[in-house]
Image (cartoon, rainbow, N blue to C red):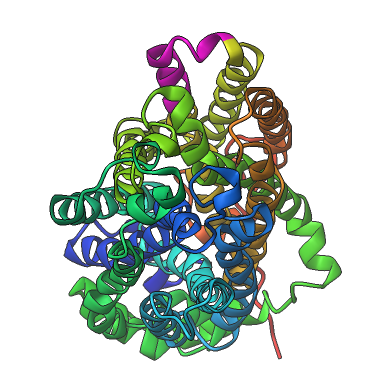
Amino acid sequence: MAIAVLNALDTAKTQWYHMTAIVIAGMGFFTDAYDLFVITTVSKLLGRLYYYDPSTGKPGKLPVSVNNLVTGVALVGTLSGQLFFGYLGDKLGRKKVYGITLIMMVVCAICSGLSFGSTSGSVMTTLCFFRFWLGFGIGGDYPLSATIMSEYANKKTRGAFIAAVFAMQGVGIIFAGLVSMTLSAIFLHYYDTPGFNKNPAEYSDVFSTQPEADYLWRIVLMIGALPAIVTFYWRMKMPETARYTALIEGNAKQAASDMGSVLEIEIQAEQDKVAQFKAANEYSLLSKEFFRRHGKHLIGTTTTWFLLDIAFYSQNLTQKDIFQNMGLTEKPQFVNALREVFQTSRAMFIVAMFGTFPGYWFTVFLIERLGRFKIQLVGFFMMSFFMFIIGFKYIELRTHKYTFATLYGLTFFFANFGPNSTTFVLPAELFPTRVRSTCHAISAACGKAGAMVGAFGVQTYTLDSDPNKIKKAMLFLAFTNMLGFCFTFLVTETKGRSLEEISGEDGGNGSNGTGGKNETQMTATPVTS
């Protein structure tokens, strides 16, 4: 049972409104990535500023528990926000909730740079409080951006469009390194000092940790509000998706009007068809019918995202501790505080530019040719392969920094030309309109649970740059990626079909769960009152 407004969306040629939607939703992900990962560039600076202990003879360093909390609290907020806003996206509408998440991100990014007090405890408490709520807002962006893009796109390029939105995460990571690197270079130009070990012992940290550095980390965090502010107006101008308006609200006339103006064509409302379609798909998330149709896919999307994010966030949050062994940064005692920020940011920028960033766009350009299923399988396998080599040969590779850097960069490349992109795309396509945002939120929240394993668990093995501990961490991540490879067989290929065909909302069999395309189509049975 084809509905005119949905058919118009599925068969529409790529137009300006598609590009606009990608930019608007993508700028949200740019902001998300910048805010989540920029903390990596300044966390060591926080230790030097607030946790110097003269008795150690070394620069100040965040205690393990404080470091994990500072870098991981936003992930806890993200998990909570995904579940909360994902549910509201199905109940109140995608557009209504979309603006709230952006406002939270702006306010909390700015407040992250403020402190209610000057002691280490008060500064860290303030930072963690606002980064939790920053993460809460970021969490809402995951299910809403994916759902909006999937419901706007045509069926031939839907995967590429959703992947393009997610690829802005890579741009955000690059800018996190670039902004920190640029600002620290400017500060260094005016406030350069000798390294820690080049000052009298009793004044080493005092002279090598510039007081002006306390402004640097605040400015770096607060800049994360800018892209969200820029896109707020355009986000509020976007109409509600036709699928939500028609299939959940049951307002065929409004859906046809909204999409008719966007596509610049005349679309028939077909209220009777919409009413029949809506009545045939009233089952809830917790119903037996949902689990019969979609239970296996939900297990697949949640487990693969969980396992992927253990590795992905472990890589991103711990890279500052591995950079020394790659020869990209010097040991803290040889540099001053601002130069340490500069070197860490520069290394993060290099890895993101040449390892992380290309993988996202390989996915964008190839996802409609290769399909989501193959890209995810290959990505998980290659991540596991390269991490196993790094872990098994870690001690030897430390003396071959270019080989090490290449292997390490390839793990980032195949994460993004692989499961980091596809685990975002698939939940936006596999599930019916009525629970699409919620199911994406559940899948994403499981991902953030995996990220928390990385932030609070794996990261403890890398903080002191102990080669044996890092070796164990890499072998563990290789194992989790191989598990992700296995659980990928619970999801199916979705390319080339409408959302209603995939989910079975059109009365067909939906996804057959084999990783291939279900060719069987059935006619929906009209529901009579």
Write down the region rendered in magenta.
396-409
In the picture, measured across the screen, residue 525 lies left or right of residue 248, that is right
Q: Quadrant of residue 288?
A: bottom right
Predominant secondary structure, magenta span: helix
From the viewer's side, name the closer residue of 12 and 210.
210
Q: Where 376 falls versus 437 (above or below)?
A: above
Count the marks: 0
Q: Residue at x 30, y 85 (%)?
A: 236
Measuring from the top left, give residue 133's x and y in whole percent.
53, 78
In the picture, measured across the screen, residue 421 lies left or right of residue 434, that is left
Residue situated furthest right in the rendering = 288
Q: Residue at x 63, y 79 (%)?
A: 84
Measuring from the top left, give residue 75's x and y in whole percent.
59, 62
Q: Where 403 falls versus 378 (above or below)?
A: above
From the viewer's side, name the closer residue of 85 and 57.
57
Q: State yes or no: residue 154 in magenta.
A: no
Q: Quadrant of residue 435?
A: bottom right
From the viewer's side, name the closer residue of 82 and 240.
82
Residue 29 appears in view? yes
Q: Where 361 falls versus 140 (above or below)?
A: above
